[in-house]
């Protein structure tokens, strides 16, 4: 079943050739995961990148029932960045499928029990808040939060509703590779 593909270009023009290339490559992702509802591809030229090899950015986000997977890569050529991001996405899909197939012991997958939060972007706000995200938090334990953090490609932090403490927690990756957990309390 074909899925919706949306291509956005920032600081660059998405030519017909590039559009065809992206559509052809991304439409093949349903070979790896057939539950995909939509794919959003952000292509950007970052003028302020420190290195010329990091100026072209390709970010792929795929959504389906109960999952969101994201990959981002940079290269000196937008086609190379897209190809590398697609390779990374295929590895994320394989990892997601492996986690889902292992199950939870009760016959239900983690995706069925705790669907991933959906992110919505709003229009540009005043300079203090440049970006605002709203998402639905689903109850999960700390282990599932770490898995979701890795699957989404979030390398710094992940906000989730901790089912055991019944509160919003922030999971973050420490410099030594371990994870930290912030458990806020109203004072």
Image (cartoon, helix red, strand yellow):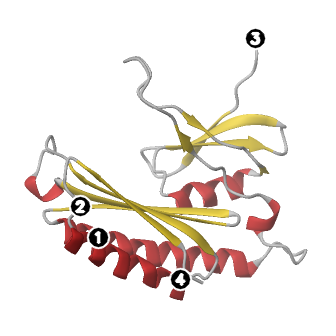
For mark 3, give the secondary structure.
Answer: loop
Residue 78 % position (x, y): 20, 65
Tag 1 and tag 4, C-beta contact below 8 Å: no
Q: Which residue is mark 3?
A: 187
Q: Residue furthest toward the top?
A: 187
Q: Quadrant of the N terminus?
A: bottom right
Q: Earlier in the sequence, mark 1 or mark 3?
A: 1
Q: Quadrant of residue 19?
A: bottom left
Crowd band around label 4 with a 10 angstrom C-alpha radius: few (<14), some (14–19), many (20+): some
Give the numbered dot on residue 30. 4
For mark 2, give the secondary structure.
Answer: loop
Q: Earlier in the sequence, mark 1 or mark 2?
A: 2
Q: Earlier in the sequence, mark 2 or mark 4?
A: 2
Q: Which residue is mark 1?
A: 19
Q: Nearer the viewer, residue 184 or 93?
A: 93
Tag 1 and tag 2, C-beta contact below 8 Å: yes
Alpha carbons under labels 1 and 2: distance apart: 6 Å
Alpha carbons under labels 1 and 4: distance apart: 18 Å
For mark 1, give the secondary structure.
Answer: helix
Of badges 1 and 4, nearer the viewer stands 1
Crowd band around label 1 with a 10 angstrom C-alpha radius: few (<14), some (14–19), many (20+): some
Give the numbered dot on residue 14. 2
Of badges 3 and 4, nearer the viewer stands 4
Alpha carbons under labels 3 and 2: distance apart: 51 Å
Q: Earlier in the sequence, mark 3 or mark 4?
A: 4
Q: Quadrant of residue 85?
A: bottom left
Q: Residue furthest toward the front?
A: 16
Residue in the picture at 82% in, 72% down: 104
- Note whether 80 is above or below 142 in the view shown: below
Of badges 3 and 2, nearer the viewer stands 2
């Amino acid at each position: 079943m074909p899925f919706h593909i949306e291509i956005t270009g920032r600081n660059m023009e998405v030519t017909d050739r590039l559009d065809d290339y992206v559509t052809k490559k991304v439409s093949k992702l349903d070979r790896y995961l057939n539950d995909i509802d939509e794919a959003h591809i952000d292509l950007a030229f970052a003028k302020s990148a420190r290195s010329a090899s990091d100026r072209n950015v390709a970010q792929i986000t795929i959504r389906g029932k109960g999952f969101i997977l994201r990959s981002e890569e940079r290269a000196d050529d937008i086609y190379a960045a897209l190809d590398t991001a697609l390779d990374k996405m295929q590895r994320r899909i394989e990892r997601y499928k492996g986690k889902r197939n292992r199950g939870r012991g009760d016959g239900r997958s983690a995706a069925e029990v705790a669907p991933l939060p959906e992110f919505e972007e709003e229009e540009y706000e005043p300079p203090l808040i440049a970006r605002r995200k709203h998402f639905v938090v689903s109850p999960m334990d700390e282990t599932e939060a770490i898995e979701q953090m890795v699957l989404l490609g979030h390398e710094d932090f992940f906000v989730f509703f901790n089912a055991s403490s019944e509160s919003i927690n922030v999971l973050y990756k420490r410099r030594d590779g371990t994870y930290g957990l912030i458990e806020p309390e109203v004072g």
